[in-house]
Image: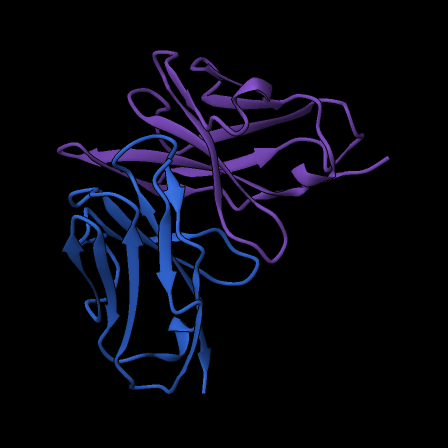
Amino acid sequence: DIQMTQSPSSLSASVGDRVTITCRASQSISSYLNWYQQKPGKAPDLLIYAASSLQSGVPSRFSGSGSATDFTLTISSLQPEDFATYYCQQSFSTPLTFGGGTKVEIK
Amino acid sequence: QVQLQESGPGLVKPSETLSLTCTVSGGSISSYYWSWIRQPAGKGLEWIGRMYTSGSTNYNPSLKSRVTMSVDTSKNQFSLKLRSVTAADTAVYFCARSRARLDFYYMDVWGKGTTVTVSS
């Protein structure tokens, strides 16, 4: 199985801050990397697919980058509705695997 | 737009079989992969497996011996059976649709999730 490691596991930030979350794969996955946002009690929402493609309807302050084993999700200016947990997920091979999550909290 | 709704018992006894159904509305079930994912309370996401509407399946090896997925295209539904459950199978269970751009697959539509508790 491909292991996905996210860092940090949690962070505190203020509205307007630039936030960066990293995800590392245990082997090269090319650009087969997706990012999801999950709010408490809700299902995950797709933000980014194929490492850097913005899902339709997702605000442009979200962006993704990276390839092979190292990936980044960036929120350029954190908004109140962005406080949530973020997960990366590889689609290179089955079993599909998720990172452990990064909880973004209000400072 | 396409919506997914999970349904099934919220309480299952240990050693019995967990059975869930995901109903697809607002679109066709055909020509997509359909996945099940679970999340224990306060923990991360675990992919259980997926099924294509042709009937082909991929299961997580950690659960493969206990999992069966099926699809009923006439009802626009797909199903999960997990046998011999224990307390470790207590979780919120989500169904999700996978679609692809080129060969990049991603889960773009999710159900709201259903909580399943394993307890006697």
Q: Quadrant of the C terminus of chain B?
A: top right
Q: Position of residue A97 (x, y in %)?
A: 39, 41
The residue at 34%/26% (across/down) is B33
Residue B87 is situated, as x and y percent measured from the top left of the image, at 74, 39
**Chain coloured purple in the rendered structure:** B
Residue B52 occupies quadrant: top left
Asked if B57 appears above or below A101 in the picture, the reply is: above
Q: Position of residue A5 (x, y in %)?
A: 37, 55
Q: Is residue A25 left or right of residue B66?
A: left
Judge whether A54 appears above or below A22 on screen: above
Q: Is residue B12 above or below residue A105?
A: above
Task: Look at the picture and state if A58 lies above or below A18.
Answer: above
Residue that sits furthest to the right in the current view: B120
Q: Residue at x 25, y 36 (%)?
A: A92
Note the chain letter of the blue one: A
Residue placed at 22% from the left, 76% from the top?
A76
Whether residue B50 is visible here, answered yes or no, is: yes
- Residue B91 or residue B111, whichever sits in front: B91
Q: Residue at x 71, y 28 (%)?
A: B85
Quarter of the figure that contains the N terminus of chain B:
top left
